[in-house]
Amino acid sequence: MTSMLKLSYRYDQTAARLEVDGLPDFSSGHGESVIGILSAWRLQLVGAPELEGKRDHLEALMAVVFPYARHQISGVSRPEGWSHHPVSIRPVDGLHQLELTSSQPDVPPLTIQLDDADLADLLRCLDALRSDVRVSISWPEVVNHPLSRRELVERVPLGRRLAAPVFGGVALAVVGVMAMVIPLPTQEIKAPSDSIESPSPDSVSDPSQADPSR
Amino acid sequence: MTESTVTSLQEAPVSTAVLGRRGMERLDLLLLTVESLDFNGGEAMLWATQQLGFETLFPNRVELWKRRCHNPLRRSTRRGRLGTAETEALIRLLCAMADRLYPMLHQLLSSREPSDLSKQRWALVDQRLSDLIAERFNLRRGAVQRLLSTDHSASIQRQLVLTLALAAGPGGVDRLRASLLDPTP
């Protein structure tokens, strides 16, 4: 009976094909053609072995691909899930290196190189799955935020980033050295005696006195 | 553009994003890139606005052009910021156009395509985009000169095409909106 209810949906792009298998969850009131319980998935990427796994693995894949694509769309290449994560992706030589660590012991990690077109295809497959009304699964929420200024600054090459402050510092240092080396112009200082104004004999010290010149 | 894409774009929640100066520059430049990839891009955009239900916002080509003139890099630029409804409509329009052009974007980005063919395709994009920029943008602006400079244009154009590819499809609207709201570094 179970095999009759098994549902399978496929999402195709030029270089990627994602297939999901599952069963309807009648306890949640889903229809017969709606997958409510995901039993398996397979992902075929051109030039790479087929990937398959359970729902947890698919969610782990989504958890790194969506943030990575979010950064790429802003021109920022940032690794995602590089440590303690079953799936990781990072930029390598203009490509995107997807690495999948098996939960089984003694199985080496699988590495797949994706170009920009492969990454876009994979993203579209995952987008199509998440927005498919025939698959009613509560996927982890994807929140797209504007990047911080610091993350955006990092995409600018270090040389260009440092050019302005280095130039400013050098200019300041040059001006400082010149100020110390070049002597200040000497000013004539008047003697203290000159500075005291001698009283004029004509001055009227008391306005109430009569002016003798009159 | 498939029917399901149009439906999903219409059903998505409307944002209240107001783009800054840099965001508006990028949005208009991405629309210009769409025009450089599609000879009938102007007509296709107008058709797409009707398909997406934005005919009241953009009833004709002139109204669409007037909204795009909020880009400060344009020759005839308009002051003030674009409203939230118009911004959201332009973002959804761009994602729909990117979805329609996705096979071409894939060809341009794929490393499996023959290199000679790929070079010729990029050369055509470069020529058309440069012509459109020279026709519509203010060439005295440093940012516009950088778009046209041979040192920077190739990497800028690749980033524009990659942005369109990653913004195409149902989930692209949210990604693109967040990216356009990035602060100026």
Image (cartoon, helix red, strand yellow):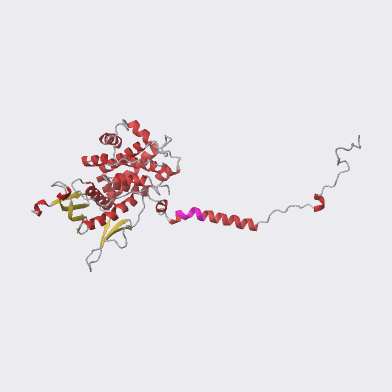
Q: Is residue A112 in sight in this rendering?
A: yes
Residue B80, compared with residue A92, is above or below; it is: above
Residue A170, compared with residue B66, is above or below; it is: below
Image-quadrant location for residue B91: top left
Location of the N terminus of chain B (image quadrant) = top left
Q: Is residue A115 in sight in this rendering?
A: no
How many marks on residues? 0
Residue A70 image point, x, y percent:
32, 50
Can you name the residue that lies furthest to the left here? A1
Left/right placement of residue A147 relative to residue A57 reads right
Residue A10 image point, x, y percent:
17, 50
Magenta segment, which residues? Answer: A160-166
Left/right placement of residue B44 relative to residue A209 reads left
Image-quadrant location for residue A205: top right
Residue B145 image point, x, y percent:
43, 43
Instruction: Determine the main secondary structure of the stretch shown in magenta.
Output: helix
Query: Residue at point 26% right, 39% down?
Result: B10
Can you name the residue that lies furthest to the bottom here? A106
- In the rendered image, residue B67 lying in the magenta stretch gets the answer no
Residue sitting nearer the eye, B122 or B158 = B158
- In the rendered image, residue A162 lying in the magenta stretch gets the answer yes
Residue B48 image point, x, y percent:
27, 36
Query: Residue at point 14% right, 49% down?
Result: A26
